[in-house]
Amino acid sequence: MSARAVVLLSLLATTACVPVLVGGLILKSSKSNAQKREFITQLQNTNMERERQGLRSLDVCSEKYKFDQGWAQEDPVCLERIRRYQTSDQNALDMGNTAAPTVSHDTAASKPPSSR
């Protein structure tokens, strides 16, 4: 094989593989372990506050999926639900509101009509 052919083949192989490799690494998990720990702590605090207010807890799998899809897919409990969601089962995950600090936006909806 000529040197030109080797260079051409290696160039084609490299340019085709790099985006796939980088995409795979990003999909696997784009968050650090510290970010994941902070997320779980925040989610637990948010859910404790929601329960104290009489609201339903946020779904862990749905919130993990919104935060980092690759990380959520590493959780065997969430993986099947994620697959169902990705194949058009919109009820498999709750993709409404995120686990941002606290959720005052649905406190009004959960109160009886007489107290609004």
Image (tube, rainbow, N blue to C red):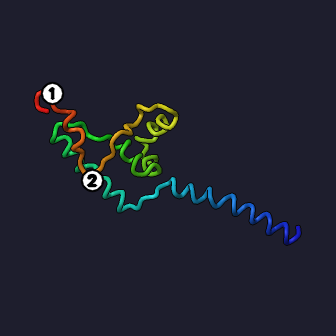
Q: Nearer the viewer, residue 66 or 59?
A: 66
Residue 111 in the image, given as x and y percentages of width and height:
16, 32
Residue 50 in the image, given as x and y percentages of width and height:
20, 42
Q: Residue at x 16, y 40 (%)?
A: 53
Q: Which residue is mark 2?
A: 42
SS under mark 1: helix
Q: Residue at x 35, y 39 (%)?
A: 96
Q: Residue at x 24, y 36 (%)?
A: 56
Quadrant of the rendered structure where residue 105 is?
top left
Quadrant of the rendered structure where residue 1 is?
bottom right
Quadrant placement of the C terminus: top left
In primary-sequence order, the first of circles 1 and 2 is 2
- The amino acid type of the residue labelled 2 equals Gln
State the mark number for residue 62.
none
Question: How far apart in space, not on screen, are marks 1 and 2 (Cα)?
Answer: 30 Å
Residue 103 in the image, given as x and y percentages of width and height:
24, 45
Q: Which residue is mark 1?
A: 113
- The amino acid type of the residue labelled 1 equals Pro
Above or below for 36 versus 113: below
The mark closer to the camera, 1 or 2, is 1
